Image (tube, grey):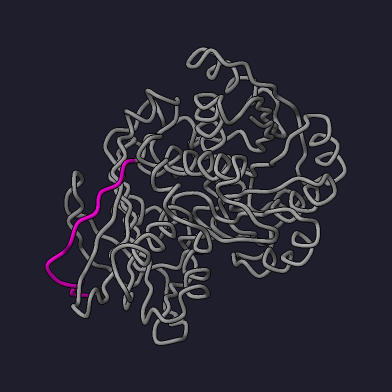
């Protein structure tokens, strides 16, 4: 059993600590920290009510490396689970190195002043973590995270060679709002408005954001419009599976979301550069975030299901084969169990699983790791046991688009 420090008190952080408290055989002591301690206290009260487990809480500015280092030491944590904003990844990694503990996150680093998310900044820590004998695990959410594990599982057990890989992310939930985001609005909108990008024949192919649409019939959700876009697991998959000829990421969006996003973009509300307003600088996107519903507030009102998975085409025993692995998660069931909707659940549960595998030594190593580098089997087993069961099926033919 081990002590753990979780940083971040949003919906994902809430799910993660709830699930940790349901696995006390691994997590002997849990501390939840955030800039706003009252959010941590509210989550701790829910954890106690649902599981009977008491967790500690703390106020923390995760940009302050010295303060984070001191909190790690005070809690006796062996692992820091970073579920804060991706702007803070590097500072938290620095604190882990200072304190001599391992690190896990669910999203790669982004500079505050540039809508650019990539692994290069964190991969640069490889030598320092390796020399310290510590493990840093990147992108242990669903996508990135579970979808990468689905890929490694496919390569290990289902296909001898992967030629094409498509990641399909569908949120079929309805929260009743004309426009809202299911996770941090600032991060969500920065991702969605970025140019599309996919890997094909050894190079990146770029295009306008949300310009390429296809319709796919998702199990337990139905037909949905999905759009080609860039997502960070494409970068690590292309690095660790360079022989895959094409890797694409698709995400579904409803008409209302896209209509509002287009208008907000046209009037400048999605800008991340400062503008002057009444004598002081503001960031339009940060102001918009303050106006939108808090993602954690969507849990009680969201109905429907998510369906996220991978479709891989390649060869098995010399014969072409197409394999689909996916998970369907129910928003209402996720809320009943943890007090958060399925988008938070599908990220928070994998973070807990990755932490458990690191603390029990089933996943180990010195350096910086992506999910594709690790044995998929124990992770896939825990998905089935921890609320995210998956299904494998053969498709009659590759995707036609």
- Measuring from the top left, give residue 191's x and y in whole percent: 50, 60
- Measuring from the top left, give residue 158's x and y in whole percent: 28, 64
Residue drawn at point x = 41 percent, y = 30 percent: 299
Residue 84 sits above or below residue 398 on the image: above
Task: Please state which of residues 310 and 43 is positioned toward the viewer in this rendering.
Answer: 310
Residue drawn at point x = 59 percent, y = 56 percent: 138
Write down the quadrant of residue 359 in the picture. top right
| Numbered label tally | 0
In this image, 313 relative to 132: left or right?
Answer: left
- Measuring from the top left, give residue 330's x and y in whole percent: 30, 35
- Measuring from the top left, give residue 178's x and y in whole percent: 35, 42
- Check the picture and name the quadrant holding the N terminus: top right
Task: Please state which of residues 264 and 230 is positioned toward the viewer in this rendering.
Answer: 230
In this image, 303 relative to 295: left or right?
Answer: left
In this image, 55 relative to 381: left or right?
Answer: right
Residue drawn at point x = 64 percent, y = 59 percent: 109
Write down the quadrant of residue 26 in the picture. top right
Residue drawn at point x = 34 percent, y = 55 percent: 169
Task: Please state which of residues 341 and 298 is positioned toward the viewer in this rendering.
Answer: 341
Task: State the extent of the magenta-drawn residues as a range.
Answer: 389-401
Task: Please state which of residues 264 and 362 is positioned toward the viewer in this rendering.
Answer: 362
Q: Does residue 346 belong to the magenta stretch?
A: no
In this image, 20 relative to 192: left or right?
Answer: right
Q: Can residue 274 be seen in this snapshot?
A: no
Q: Can residue 97 be seen in this snapshot?
A: yes
- Check the picture and name the quadrant holding the C terminus: bottom left
Residue 298 sits above or below residue 241 on the image: above
């Amino acid at each position: 059993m081990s002590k753990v420090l979780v940083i971040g008190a949003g919906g994902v952080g809430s799910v993660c600590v709830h699930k940790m408290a349901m696995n006390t055989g691994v997590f002997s002591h849990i501390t939840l920290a955030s800039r706003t301690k009252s959010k941590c206290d509210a989550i701790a009260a829910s954890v106690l009510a649902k599981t009977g487990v008491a967790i500690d809480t703390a106020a923390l500015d995760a940009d302050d490396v010295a303060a984070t280092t001191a909190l790690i030491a005070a809690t006796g944590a062996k692992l820091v689970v970073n579920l804060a904003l991706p702007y803070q990844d590097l500072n938290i990694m620095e604190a882990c190195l200072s304190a001599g503990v391992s690190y896990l996150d669910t999203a790669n680093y982004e500079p505050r002043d540039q809508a650019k998310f990539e692994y290069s900044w964190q991969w640069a820590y490889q030598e320092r973590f390796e020399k310290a004998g510590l493990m840093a695990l990147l992108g242990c959410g669903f996508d990135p995270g579970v979808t990468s594990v689905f890929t490694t599982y496919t390569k290990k057990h289902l296909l001898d060679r992967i030629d094409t890989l498509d990641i399909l992310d569908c949120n079929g939930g309805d929260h009743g709002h004309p426009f809202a985001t299911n996770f941090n609005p600032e991060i969500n909108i920065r991702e969605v408005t970025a140019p599309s990008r996919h890997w094909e024949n050894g190079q990146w192919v770029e295009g306008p954001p949300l310009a390429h649409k296809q319709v796919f019939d998702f199990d337990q959700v139905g037909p949905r419009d999905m759009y080609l876009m860039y997502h960070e697991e494409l970068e690590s998959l292309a690095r660790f599976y360079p022989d895959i000829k094409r890797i694409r990421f698709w995400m579904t969006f409803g008409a209302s979301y896209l209509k509002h996003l287009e208008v907000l973009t046209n009037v400048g509300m999605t800008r991340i550069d400062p503008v002057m307003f009444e004598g002081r600088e503001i960031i339009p996107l940060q102001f918009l975030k303050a106006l939108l519903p808090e993602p954690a507030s969507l849990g009680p009102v969201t109905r429907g299901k998510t369906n996220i998975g991978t479709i891989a085409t390649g060869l098995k025993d010399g014969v072409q084969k197409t394999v689909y692995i996916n998970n369907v998660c129910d928003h209402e069931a996720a809320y009943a169990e943890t007090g958060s909707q399925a988008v938070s659940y599908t990220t928070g549960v994998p973070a807990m699983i990755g932490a458990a595998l690191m603390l029990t030594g089933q996943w180990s190593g010195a350096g910086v790791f992506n999910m594709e580098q690790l044995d998929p089997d124990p992770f896939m087993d825990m998905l089935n046991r921890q609320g995210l069961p998956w299904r494998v099926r053969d498709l009659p033919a590759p995707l036609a688009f």
